[in-house]
Amino acid sequence: MADKKIEKALYGPSTLEVALGAVLGLALGVAVACVYLVLKPVQLVKETPKEVAQGVVYYLPGKTDATKARAWQAKQATFVSGGEIIATEEELNAWAASLGGTAPAAAPAAAPKAPAQPGAPAAPADNAFLSASGLNFRLEGERMHVSQKVLFNYFGLTKEVILQSAGGFVRAGEGFVFQPEAVYLGSCPLHAVPGTTGALLGTLLKQQKVPDEFRAAWAKISAIAVEGGLLKVTTQP
C-alpha cells in the first residue's frame, strides 16, 4: 500500500484515473447544461416565426376556438364505436379540455423547519418530480405538435416549463403509436439526450385521465395519419 502511494506521488494519477475523472466531469457538465436549458424560458408566439433566432426555442400552442369544435363529442362517439373521423386541432383541444386537470400551482416557499427533537427520526428529504397539465394539440401539414405545461420540482426548486413534441404516427406491433421527431422540455432538446424521451413521455402520459373506453378504442385503430393539417382516424367496431 505504501509503495502505491509513493508511486502515485512520483508519477501522478494513472491513465484509468484520468479517464474516469474526465468521464465524470463530462457527465456532470451535461447534467448542469440540461438543467439550465430546462429552466430557460421558451418564447411564446402566435404564428410561426419567419426568421428563427439562434438558441431560441419557440412555443406555438394549438387553437382552442369552441365555436369550431362543436362536433367533437359526436366524433368521439364515432371513434369509440368504430368508424372514420376527421378532426381539427380545435376539436382535439376541446376533447383534451374535457379530460380536466390543470397544472398544479407552484408551491409557496416552505416555512423554516423547527429543530428536530433529540432522538426523533430525521424528516424525509423532498423528492424530485414532474407533474403535467392537460394536453394541447396543433396540426401542421403532416405533423402533430403535442404540448403540456409541466411543473418541474427538484428539491425545492420549482418551475413551470413547457414540454412540446412534434412527429407523426407509426405502426408498432398490432397498433399505432405517436413517434416524436423532436421533444423539448423547456429549451432542452431531449431528443438529443439518449434514453430520456421515451421514459419521460411515458411517465407523463400515465398522468392523463383518459377514459378506459378511449384506450380500448385506440387499440382498434386500423389507420391514422395527419394530412393537410387534419387528423384522420379509422377504428374498427
Image: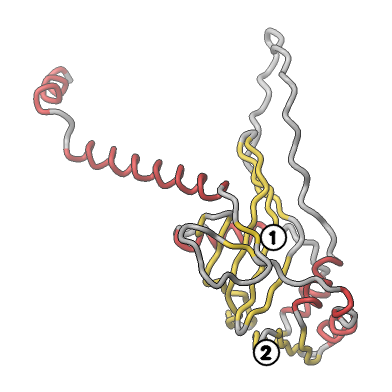
**Mark 1 to mark 2 CA distance (whole Å):** 25 Å
Figure quadrant of the N terminus: top left
Image quadrant assignment for residue 183? bottom right
Q: Nearer the viewer, mark 1 or mark 2?
A: 1
| 136 and 173: which is toward the camera | 136
Q: Position of residue 73 (x, y in %)?
A: 89, 79
Q: Position of residue 113 (x, y in %)?
A: 72, 18
Along the horizontal axis of the image, is 105 left or right of 119? right
| 3 and 91: which is toward the camera | 91
| 62 and 100: which is toward the camera | 62
The disc placed on residue 148 is 1
Figure quadrant of the C terminus: bottom right
Q: Does the CB distance between marks 1 and 2 fall below 8 Å?
A: no
Q: Residue at x 87, y 74 (%)?
A: 66
Q: Position of residue 181 (x, y in %)?
A: 52, 72
Label 2: which residue? 223
Along the horizontal axis of the image, is 165 left or right of 30? right
Image quadrant assignment for residue 110? top right
Q: Reply above or below: 115 against 42.
A: above
Q: Residue at x 41, y 47 (%)?
A: 30
- Which amino acid, mark 2? Ala
Q: Reply above or below: 45 against 17.
A: below
The disc placed on residue 228 is none
